[in-house]
Amino acid sequence: MTETPSTTDGLDAATQRTAVRERYARIAEESASCCDDTAACCGETTAADSGTEVSKQHGYSAADLAAVDGDANLNLGCGNPTAIASLDAGDTVLDLGSGGGFDCFLAAREVGPEGRVVGVDMTPEMVETARENVGENDASNVEFRLGEIEHLPVADASVDVVISNCVVNLSPDKSQVFREAYRVLRPGGRVAISDVVLTAELPADLRVDPESVAGCVAGAASIPALESMLTEAGFVDVAIEPKADSEAFIREWDDALDLSDYLVSATIEAERPEVGA
């Protein structure tokens, strides 16, 4: 695979963060997914698609969708990280970019009352929405914190599993995200992430478009770049697997351009080594 840029060219970090925060503040305030409950990941899709159908395309079952109440499912993902996380009862789980909290509430079911789930999001409106959903779901083992995923408000070595759903691509400093994930994980802990990865060079106009960054497109990194970032952060057993069936919903994100020529959803897994390993 030809190496592709891991960040956008010509768009500074502050501009990226502002574009992302403004977009997701608007979504949270509307208490609906992008474009009136018709969006996939952060991109666009057609009005013919229902939120339920989009979620199923991302890998959620009907039981998953029925299990969570309120406005938690904003259809902003590109996969189902809880499906690959292999959570155990009693685990402490951290969700990077937790949005309305949908994946957190699914994780809470897996870890049980003895476990704990923490969601971190940099958008105050999203954190407010997620906290309201705690009551809707009677989820006493879930909490939400305001913060950037590059600077997590979480103690060292306090987490068993880090999950995330189509959020790491939004960060202007993905290497720092993985360093932070490594810091908060206990030895033997792991990451289980769903995200989009870059498979070909994006057109230059998309790479410098704030809306494209906020839309889970321009900030995507290639698989080799992500593997290097994870390894440099200290992770082992890095495995990144593209999901070919994601092309169907990625094609719906842009009316003028087939983004599946440049992007694919993937599962990203890695482990923090045990002490002495």
Image: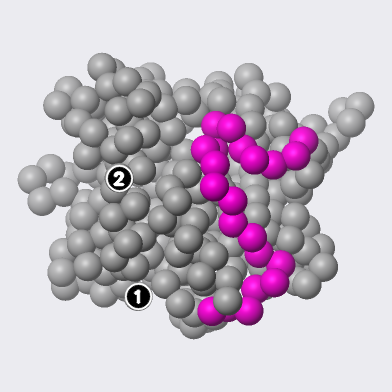
Q: Compared with residue 53, is residue 27 higher up or lower down, i.e. above or below?
A: above
Q: Which residue is drawn at 49% across and 56% down?
A: 127
Q: Is residue 139 magenta?
A: yes
Q: Compared with residue 243, is residue 74 higher up or lower down, i.e. above or below?
A: below
Instruction: Tell me the magenta residue range.
Output: 136-156
Judge depth for marks 2 and 1 and give the one in front: 2
Task: Give 123 or 184, whichever is nearer the viewer.
Answer: 123
Give me the disc on residue 33: none
Colouring convention used in this rendered image of the protein? one colour
Image quadrant holding the N terminus, namely: top left
Q: Compared with residue 72, is residue 16 higher up or lower down, i.e. above or below?
A: above
Could you tell me which secondary element the residue under label 2 belongs to?
A: helix
Determine the CA span between mark 2 and mark 1.
25 Å
Tell me which amino acid carries mark 2: Glu
Q: Predominant secondary structure in magenta?
A: loop
Mark 2, other Cα within 10 Å: few <14 / some 14–19 / many ≥20: some
Q: Is residue 204 magenta?
A: no
Instruction: Return the residue at label 1.
Output: 52
Image quadrant assignment for residue 147: top right
Tell me which amino acid carries mark 1: Thr
Instruction: Return the residue at label 2.
Output: 22
